[in-house]
Amino acid sequence: MESVAIVGVGLIGGSFGLALRHHGFRGPIFGVSSPPAISAALEIGAISRAASLEDAVEEADLLYLAQPVDRIFSTIEGLSPLVARRVSRSPILITDAGSTKRLIVEQAERFLPPGVFLGGHPMAGKERSGVEVAEATLFRDRPYVLTVPDGFSNPFETAFRNWLSAFGVRLITLDPQAHDQVVAFTSHLPQLLSTTLAATLDSAGNPLYSELHGTGLLDMSRLALSSPALWESIVATNRGPILEALDAFAAELAVLRQSVLSDSLSTVFVRANTFSASLRK
Amino acid sequence: MESVAIVGVGLIGGSFGLALRHHGFRGPIFGVSSPPAISAALEIGAISRAASLEDAVEEADLLYLAQPVDRIFSTIEGLSPLVARRVSRSPILITDAGSTKRLIVEQAERFLPPGVFLGGHPMAGKERSGVEVAEATLFRDRPYVLTVPDGFSNPFETAFRNWLSAFGVRLITLDPQAHDQVVAFTSHLPQLLSTTLAATLDSAGNPLYSELHGTGLLDMSRLALSSPALWESIVATNRGPILEALDAFAAELAVLRQSVLSDSLSTVFVRANTFSASLRK
């Protein structure tokens, strides 16, 4: 794996480039992105030069798609003829960093030849987006899911995995459906609850609400700062599991409401204590 | 205000004692608490010596009730004869640090003479409790609510307010009902949502849930580590406003669920963005 192209040089794409450099990758890192993102990425050293998508597919051993989910869809479709040409000459590995996997993997199965695409999801992020907040250590100690098709074989897969290991990620291989079900509960549900909490307080329209609170509300509303556009595309590509998670939460909330009425909160609190502590082991 | 007694030397009571010392209070600080709390508090200098409640009422100018809400109730009742004796000799100021105010203030009106009790609520805390995690700076830049009865007059009130100002709190005077309504939305609702989220993930029983998550879930489940007993007494003394907050949230969640179905999340996300940013100004 001698050359890499990053398509979409934002927080995740920029952090991937920085992490490669930080861990000693010496080859060229092409950036395919908007002019402002390219110049910010060049400035911090996350990429070594700008490229068109066509040139990136021609020259890179690894193509890293780090756009929002909806953009990854259209990029994969657009890659179809370019990748067909490229693989007739030499192999290429394409992976993505999208937050949902089932529909992206299906899109790749439809538009890309076999043995080319590995779905990926680095479970790292910030409430701010953009290459300006990228960090070489963003992936360290965070889970990194790979979805690997049956019988997948690509000469750059091992090198790619080795770089991820060097970044300190916790690599987890999972099928796309299982991934999407898990993140609906562990990532999409927390996001939507934070958004709903902030919207509830906004609706109530009491100016004291933004004055009179502890640090708990700051924790619980941090995710509500996230980009609406980014989340619209995540939700649109994982609607079934997300509805399942929302309904599971609503059912648990109804149980809790009943416990408030009957002064019997300790059961739910003790279960919540235990689960929350298990996240921190 | 030459002497202070802290009843319940845990996180809040201990931090109050440390903050007094840190800002130059030279008088005795009596601690009325369990033997382990007393010895830990003596060790870190949050109190200068242990006392019985009887001696504390006899000797202190300020009595600071920093127990859990349900304990504050019984302490106030028990104080009744002691305070009657004390005020026949010299004035005393009693205040509390309970998380709800209406029922506590009503309890004080019932059992204490007028001009003695100011309700208080320092909006500071941690998910861990106990004097071991007390800090002199816990109250800095945090809201501190005082509920002041009409026509209240006490010779130690000004000194007490001046110490709070020295600690760097943002002093807010509010009537007990208004306080309880606001904290139901800004403190109790976030707590109960964090608990419900952790319980939802626990119920689902998928071991991947504690492996595969981003930092968002850690934020959103931190409050779920809080003490069940503490929260049972908070909820029991603020049930009406809490049910109102839970119902407002459930209604907003139903709207969000509909937006997930109809791919129209941007309105709720933009409102949530704005509110969440307003907390951080």
Image (spheres, coloured by chain):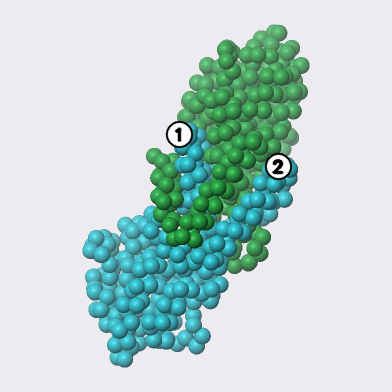
Chain colours: A cyan, B green
**Residue occupying the far top of the picture:** B89
In percent of the image, x 59 and y 58: which residue is there? Answer: A247
A235 sits left or right of B81 in the view: left
**SS type, badge 2:** helix
Residue B172 position within the rendered picture, expressed as x and y whole percent measured from the top left: 50, 26
Q: Chain of mark 1?
A: A
Q: Chain of mark 2?
A: A
Task: Look at mark 2 in the image and give the residue it sits on.
Answer: A261
Labels 1 and 2 in the same subunit: yes
Separation of marks 1 and 2 at Cα, in angstroms: 28 Å
Residue type beneath disc 2: Leu
- Image height of B111 relative to A75, above or below: above
A52 sits left or right of A270 in the view: left
Residue type beneath disc 1: Pro
**SS type, badge 1:** helix
Task: Look at mark 1 in the image and give the residue it sits on.
Answer: A207
Residue A164 position within the rendered picture, expressed as x and y whole percent measured from the top left: 44, 72
In percent of the image, x 71 and y 8: which residue is there? Answer: B88
Where is residue B157, by image quadrant? top right
- Name the quadrant of the N terminus of chain A: bottom left
- Image height of B79 relative to B234, above or below: above
